[in-house]
Image (cartoon, rainbow, N blue to C red):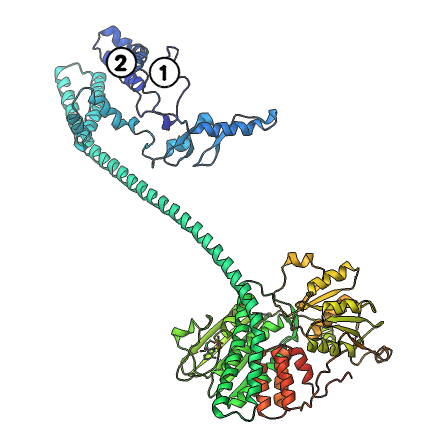
Amino acid sequence: KPLGLSPEGLEFKRGHLYDINPVGTGSMVLATTIGMLSYLGLFGELSANLSHFVSLIVCFIAVPLIAWLTKGKYYLARQSPELIPLIEEAKQLASALPAKNQAEPQVLCGVCENSFELADMSYCSVYAQPICSLCCSLDVRCLDSCKPHARLSRQLANFLRRFMTGKSVGIINSRLGRFLGLLLITNIINAALLALVYKQMMPNTVSEQMVLQQSLWTLFFIFLIVTGVISWLFLLAHESRVVAQMESNRQTRKLMREIEAHEKTDKELQRAKEHAEKANDAKSRYLSGISHELRTPLQSILGYAQLLAERPDNNEHQTRGLNIIHRSGQHLADLIEGLLDISKIEAGRLELYRNRIALPQLLDELANMFSMQASQKGIHFHYHLRGRLPKTVMADEKRLRQILINLLSNAVKYTQSGQVEFEVNYRSQIAEFIIRDTGSGIDGANLARIFDPFERVRNVHTPNVQGTGLGLTIVKLLTEIMGGELLVTSTLGVGSCFTVNLMLPWVDNEATDSSSKAKVIGYEGFQRTICLVDDDPVLRGFLSDLLIPLGFTTLEAFDAESCLGLLEQSRPDLFILDISMPGMTGLELAAVLRQRGVKAPILMLSANAQLPDEAAREKAAYDDYLVKPITNSALLEKLADYLQIKWIVQGTQVDALKQLALPERISAEPLKAASRFEIPDHPLVRELQAYAEMGYRKGVVEALGKVEEANIISAECYQYLNGLIQQFQFEQLAVSLEPTPYDPV
Ligand code: ADP
């Protein structure tokens, strides 16, 4: 180093070094050889005695000499300029720290993930990462690919090329050449060692010398054979390791390329998925918009088809045509409803409510309803309740009904003879509903697809059964989002068994439950005024019919202007606003009311099932957003919340009720009196009412058809009830079907 023959600093990292530096290796071999020869007495007795010093002196001369001869070329095989930017970065980061925390900048090893100072690091071209000296030394997979010119075999070949032709070097570098080279080196070492032994033992007599020489020669040849075999095996093992390593590297490179390709595909897939999700969102918006728009013309089509069908001068051909129009219209209405449900569930917009459900009553109601349907079809219906049911459970009542009604109506629909069994088990908060039938059954091939939309299986047993193919799709999706599972087994021609497992946690508050079930007949305190704004007179009429008997005063307005006009005379305690109205919408009206300083709660009541998103709800002027059809009890619950009133239920506080002021109904437009008809107390009417209370449109339509066929209501009454169905006024329909309806007039 002082002579400037070797580079500054010490280099010890394998990645930067030649396998052999002639300076070190050459001077060591030279010093050892000369030292040993001196020791053997080749250079006289003095040098034999001072052989250690001879070695040392040879070293001191050979090192600078070889360094000078090789021009110091073999100290460094390469360096790592790739690390410079990383160091700069690390320095910048360190300089941002307070002076006392500043340390030598460190670089992260890409293999062991520890940080080291720059002196310990090199850049690995195989991993394409900085690597620490230890990881670099231990790595056997890289085959020194960062410095191919610095490998021993290449160095030797280059060295030999100085004295021989390329062809001779090729022969030496062949497998045989390398074997012979290895054999030669090991046997030179063996020979030297045996010579040393001979020198040490140096016998005095000639015969002893001969015996020793003979033994050592014999030993040498034995060693020659052994080293020959071992060298050959070693060479083969080395070669096969290198080949295996190269193959493994090649496969790794291929795998890396594949991973890169997968990453690319993954990104593309992600992008495609986002596109698909956006498209799906757009589809859902489009679907809910269009279904909203389709309902109105569909209502006219169905209405007129019915009106025309009633004309006495229709011939058979016309009647058949009108029936087809009516049936197709109904089918379309069912489809729209089913699609809307599915798109809502798929878009994650379906909100599940937690209602207290009186489970035994609900199941009895369903069993009664379907036993009636089954008996009309001439099949048996059995309802088995296994074990005890809790009186009240928590779940979304509407969705639970939807699941069970769909499965039960399918069972009845697809069973021509025999029976339908409805079995209910309840254990550890899990309800198991089993619906078993002896109907047409489904073969294995079709079983998997019945849960897909629009999939209907038709066979000899079910050639012309009406259906949309959406029922089971909805049941499956609903069961899944309610955290349950739906299982099916079926044998063609024998029957099917659908099982729904749902977690229905029971609640232990029968007292509040019974009070909420009890009929509300009024409220405590002074009389409240509620302003109802809706362009639909039937809905306004229904709300007034509901609220006036409870002691409220209702103000009815058919649009925003008339509502604002009403405010000049009175101050309502609460507003119920429809959203889509001619002129100003309900949302705009709510904003105007707030601008005018109205503090009373405002409830929006909309037919649009798509709830506004969280952000829109926060900004809006209203207090709550209710979706039609809303049950009476849910509406009253909201009113009690917002008006802070306490209900009086039937059978209690009779005196308090007597003190109530007489309710009034004020209208901003001449009120069209709701028609009242004779409703007989007939099982078919009860069935119709049960469906109306559930909000099950398909059931309602069918039941009304049966009521009409049985000729138990007048034609006007049928028109009126049908009108309510077409407008989805199931609440009012249920109220209108009471055998002794309340007459507010
Ligand atoms: P659909 O409106 O056609 O009844 P669903 O989605 O409810 O639509 O059912 C899909 C198909 O599954 C039906 O068309 C019918 O072929 C088959 N299926 C459903 N329930 C039963 C059952 N209980 N027995 C036999 N087949 C059934």
From where the camera sits, is residue 360 visible? no
Residue 109: quadrant of the picture: top left
Question: Which residue carries the number 2 mark?
Answer: 35
Measured in 3D between alpha carbons, the distance from the residue under mark 2 to the one under mark 1, in whole angstroms, is 25 Å
Q: Nearer the viewer, residue 624 or 430?
A: 624
Instruction: Give the side of residue 585 with respect to residue 2, left or right.
Output: right
Q: Is residue 113 visible?
A: yes
Q: Answer above or below: position of 151 versus 523.
A: above
The foreground one among 22 and 269 is 269
Most foreground residue, 269 or 415: 269
As drawn, is 185 to the left or to the right of 617?
left
Q: Nearer the viewer, mark 2 or mark 1?
A: 1
Which residue does the numbered mark 1 point to in the structure image?
6
Q: Amino acid at mark 1?
A: Ser
Q: Residue at x 74, y 65 (%)?
A: 602
Give the vertical position of 680 relative to 699 (above or below). Answer: below
> To which quarter of the image does residue 219 belong?
top left
Residue type beneath disc 2: Gly
Residue 407 at x, y percent in the picture:
52, 77
